Image (cartoon, rainbow, N blue to C red):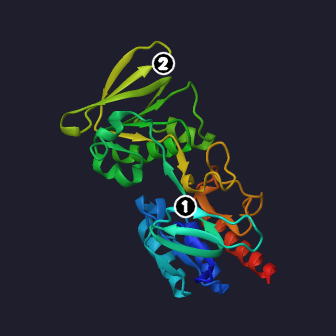
Amino acid sequence: MEQNILECVIVGSGPSGFTAAIYAARADLKPELYTGLEPGGQLTTTTEVDNFPGYPDGVTGPQMMMDLQKQAERFDTKVHYELITKVEFSKEEGGVHRLWAGNKEIFARTVIISTGATAKYLGLDDEKKYSGGGVSACATCDGFFYKGKDVVVVGAGDTAAEEATYLAKLTNKVTMLVRKDTFRASKAMIHRVLNTPNIEVKFNHELIGIEGENALVERAVVINNQTQEISKIDVHGIFIAIGHKPNTDIFAGQIDLDESGYIKTVPGSTLTNLPGVFAAGDVQDHRYRQAITAAGSGCMAAMDAEKYLAELN
């Protein structure tokens, strides 16, 4: 068992993971970070980031993540472009946690989970069929391809409202399909949607199918769930904006999760129910889901890990 026991392993590589690495490395914890399948996390699929402090002219998501990674590596964080596939967490104070990247076994005194969350889909077969041919879950990634065309946005929350207003700047017309008779979005976002002339909102409408030749979207098939009337809308793009699923499947059964699968942390900290295991970023935050809040919680996680290790000695 006296294989190399690391002081700190970070699982995930978004703003929370890299910020945790910067703080852990500066505290001399010699962190090792595993990027997962999407190095840089969700931000690498975002073109412009205009709301992260310190970038007065804005920055692209991928550039920002490269900047964060360089900063983490400057303090000797070791970055592995590998996916953690299995974990066995110790329940003992001061215990050693075991993680696997494929066949490689890793031992760590502290683990910071920063695996983020993934966009949800409706579960229609047509979504897979037309994926890459007009179905997307990221307007900022793919909106450019629909300049001057008509698109549909599915959803009722802030994400849907943001996607719709972003797309409205690029496209000819945006039709929002809202399942209920009200939005779930914040008042500011609702106001923005309703004051954008080329957004049409269809309340009590759901997407039930997609049509088009050669796996390219040409029509959205929708139902009015009050009258059961089915209609078709000619569109080139369909954007699904119905929320996110936290990437916590490999931790289920070992760590306390809420009903949506987000990791439960002690309020005001990044502590989980297991000693030496901390969670930061969107994997434990279903409310804010911003790069800046993720980065802030990454800082907290590293400081919590440092304090935990100091109290063991």
Foreground mark, 2 or 1, reads 1
Secondary element at image label 2: loop
Marks 2 and 1 sit apart, C-alpha to C-alpha, by 36 Å
Q: Amino acid at mark 1?
A: Thr
Most distant residue in the front direction: 1
Report crowding for label 2: few under 14, some 14 to 19, many 20 or more residues within 10 A (C-alpha): some
Tag 2 near tag 1, CB within 8 Å: no
Residue 278 in the image: x percent, y percent?
68, 65
Task: Identify the disc placed on residue 84.
Answer: none
Q: At x 59% / y 77%, what residue is drawn? A: 21
Check the picture and name the quadrant holding the C terminus. bottom right
Q: Earlier in the sequence, mark 2 or mark 1?
A: 1
Report crowding for label 1: few under 14, some 14 to 19, many 20 or more residues within 10 A (C-alpha): many
Q: Is residue 136 above or below residue 222?
A: below
Q: Amino acid at mark 2?
A: Asn
Residue 60 in the image: x percent, y percent?
42, 66
Residue 87 in the image: x percent, y percent?
58, 63
Q: Nearer the viewer, residue 12 or 312?
A: 312
Secondary element at image label 1: loop
Q: Which residue is mark 2?
A: 225
Looking at the image, residue 298 sits to the left or right of residue 230; the answer is: right
Q: Which residue is mark 1?
A: 115
Give the image quarter of residue 134: top left
Check the picture and name the quadrant holding the N terminus. bottom right
Q: At x 46% / y 12%, what residue is drawn? A: 227
Q: At x 23% / y 39%, what residue is drawn? A: 216
Looking at the image, residue 151 sits to the left or right of residue 56; the answer is: left
Q: At x 52% / y 87%, what residue is drawn? A: 74
Give the image quarter of residue 289: bottom right
Is residue 1 visible in the rendered structure shown here? yes
Is residue 147 visible in the rendered structure shown here? no
Give the image quarter of residue 18: bottom right
